[in-house]
Image: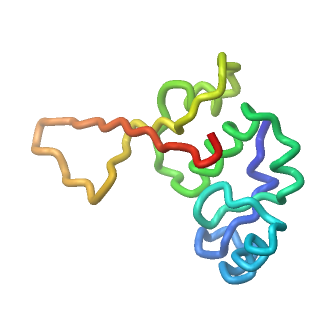
Amino acid sequence: MDYRNEFIVAARHGLESGTVRQLSRRYRKGELVRVRRGIYMAKQRWLALKPWQRYAATAQAVATENPSAEFCYETAGVLWGLQIVGVPTHIHLANASRGACRLPKAGHQRRRRRAVRLDWA
């Protein structure tokens, strides 16, 4: 299922759904759940999702936050609509690094894999 229509996205991500201040205020009041930085979902809707649906929504939120992200392992399967066994505890990225990424030396292709731990898992 595509949860991107249900996201409330901060204006800084270019998809104007509300200002950062307004969304932060609603989050503090308990009206919203922060799925990723600057990406929220209505609390009642989030609580109604099953764990594997929350994982899919979180993966889609990461894709919304970082459109150039390359997903791998179970995360890629979920984003392709495949059913997986169990609920992963991480979002798996193939092209991620923790800090500033240096360009690889000429002729070398480096692929980094990183797992982003989910807060709710």
Q: Where's the C terminus, which quadrant?
A: top right
Give me the residue at 76% from left, 57% from top. Answer: 7
The image quadrant that residue 28 belongs to is bottom right
Q: Is residue 54 above or below residue 78?
A: below
Rendering coords of residue 22 (x, y %): 74, 81
For this view, does 12 lie left or right of residue 107? right
The image quadrant that residue 112 belongs to is top left
For this view, does 41 lie left or right of residue 115? right
Rendering coords of residue 100 (x, y %): 27, 59
Give me the residue at 49% from left, 25% from top. Answer: 73
For this view, does 19 lie left or right of residue 115? right
Q: Is 20 or 46 nearer to us in this picture?
A: 46
The number of numbered badges drawn on the structure is 0
Q: How is the image coloured?
A: rainbow
Give me the residue at 15% from left, 36% from top. Answer: 108
Give me the residue at 65% from left, 45% from top. Answer: 120
The image quadrant that residue 38 belongs to is bottom right
Rendering coords of residue 90 (x, y %): 53, 37
Q: Is 36 or 5 nearer to us in this picture?
A: 36
Q: Is 42 or 121 nearer to us in this picture?
A: 121
